[in-house]
Image (cartoon, grey):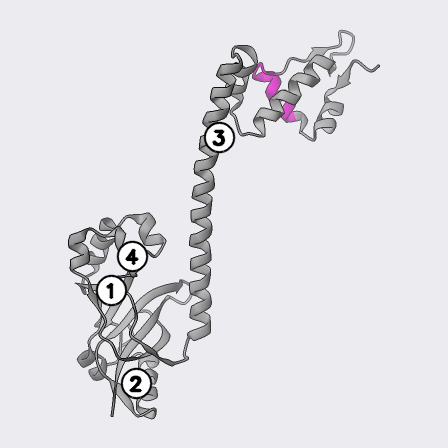
């Protein structure tokens, strides 16, 4: 029976690098024998068994420092405590990854929505979310970002929303005169305090023109808004109130932010 294995043989057997084995040796975790006549490293059966335990615990992402304590100092109860603690850490990471997956799916869906509706129109019922105007000042946006927790903002539980008054829209179709605010779906109202919820307003019932538009906020006349107004006119309708735009995506290469847009309509 072969009772000696070279570092290369052990590395191949366990699919690890020789550098990893040398690291374990340097950390006083995995002893190694050296042949007197040539100085070559080799491992005996005992080190093979020990390495199996080391890799077993490393696969659980237990730090090398703790593994050393586990194999040299700890009893069954101590090891159980370490494993239970790591189980809690993993459970927490799973929840974080599930939340990340949800955020990625939502963001992907928003870009898909942007691609599907850019420059297209539909007449729909009033949006179901509630909103609150803030103002048109940049510093107010910063205050909003500070006020609503980052994780809620990124998950789009509280969404950045623009408003262009009917008067401004008809006088100069552009986003440069927009006011800023927030909008919140009914299912997400719990992120706001009771007082903040009282400040929200609902959209009046009626017919709204829905589309997606991109803007750099600087256009003196926005071609997409002008086209939207022409579409209303062609269908025998006119703007019947302020335009509501809810942020969904950005393309930094083009310097554009994209919004779902709702515009209340009246018959002409």
Q: Residues within 10 Å of mark 1 (few under 14, many from 20)?
A: some
Asked whether the viewer can see residue 48, the reply is yes
Q: Which residue is mark 3?
A: 87
Going by the image, does 157 lie left or right of 170? Answer: right
Circle 2 sits in a helix, a strand or a loop, which is it? helix
Q: How far is disc 4 from disc 3 in space, using C-alphas?
A: 33 Å
Q: Which residue is mark 1?
A: 130
Q: Position of residue 239 (x, y in %)?
A: 25, 84
Q: How far is disc 3 from disc 1 in space, using C-alphas?
A: 41 Å
Q: Quadrant of the C terminus?
A: bottom left
- In the rendered view, tell whether residue 6 sits above or below residue 123: above
Which residue does the image show at 35% across and 77% down from the upper left? 210
- Asked whether disc 4 touches disc 2, contact meaning CB atoms under 8 Å apart, the reply is no
Between label 4 and label 1, give the one nearer the viewer.
1
Q: How far is disc 4 from disc 1 in space, using C-alphas?
A: 10 Å
- In the rendered view, tell whether residue 91 sits above or below residue 195: above
Q: Quadrant of the N terminus?
A: top right
- In the rendered view, tell whether residue 105 sits above or below residue 20: below
Q: Position of residue 225 (x, y in %)?
A: 31, 80
Name the mark on residue 229. Answer: 2
Q: Residues within 10 Å of mark 4 (few under 14, many from 20)?
A: many
Q: Residues within 10 Å of mark 2 (few under 14, many from 20)?
A: some
Residue numbers of the magenta segment: 19-29
Say which quarter of the image contains residue 49: top right
Going by the image, does 162 lie left or right of 43? Answer: left
Mark closer to the chain start, 4 or 3: 3
């Amino acid at each position: 029976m072969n009772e000696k294995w070279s570092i290369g043989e052990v590395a191949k057997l366990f699919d690890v690098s020789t550098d990893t084995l040398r690291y374990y040796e340097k950390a006083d975790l995995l002893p190694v024998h050296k042949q007197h006549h040539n100085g070559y490293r080799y491992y005996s059966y005992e080190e093979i068994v020990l390495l199996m335990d080391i890799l077993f615990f490393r696969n659980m992402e237990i730090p090398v420092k703790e593994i050393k304590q586990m194999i040299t100092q700890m009893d069954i109860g101590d090891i159980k405590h370490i494993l239970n603690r790591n189980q809690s850490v993993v459970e927490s990471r799973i929840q974080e990854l599930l939340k990340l997956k949800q955020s990625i799916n939502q963001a992907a869906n928003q870009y898909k929505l942007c691609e599907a509706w850019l420059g297209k129109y539909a007449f729909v019922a009033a949006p179901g979310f509630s909103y609150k105007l803030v103002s048109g000042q940049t510093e107010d946006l910063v205050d909003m970002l500070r006020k609503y927790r980052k994780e809620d903002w990124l998950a789009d539980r509280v969404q950045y929303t623009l408003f262009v008054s009917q008067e401004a829209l008809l006088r100069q179709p552009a986003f440069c005169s927009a006011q800023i605010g927030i909008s919140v779906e009914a299912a997400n109202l719990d992120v706001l305090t009771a007082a903040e919820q009282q400040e929200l307003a609902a959209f009046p019932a009626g017919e709204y023109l829905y589309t997606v538009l991109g803007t750099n906020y600087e256009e003196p006349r926005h071609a997409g808004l002008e086209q939207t107004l022409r579409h209303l006119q062609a269908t025998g309708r006119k703007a019947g109130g302020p335009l509501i735009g809810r942020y969904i995506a950005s393309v930094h290469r083009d310097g554009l932010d994209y919004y779902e847009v709702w515009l209340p309509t009246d018959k002409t």
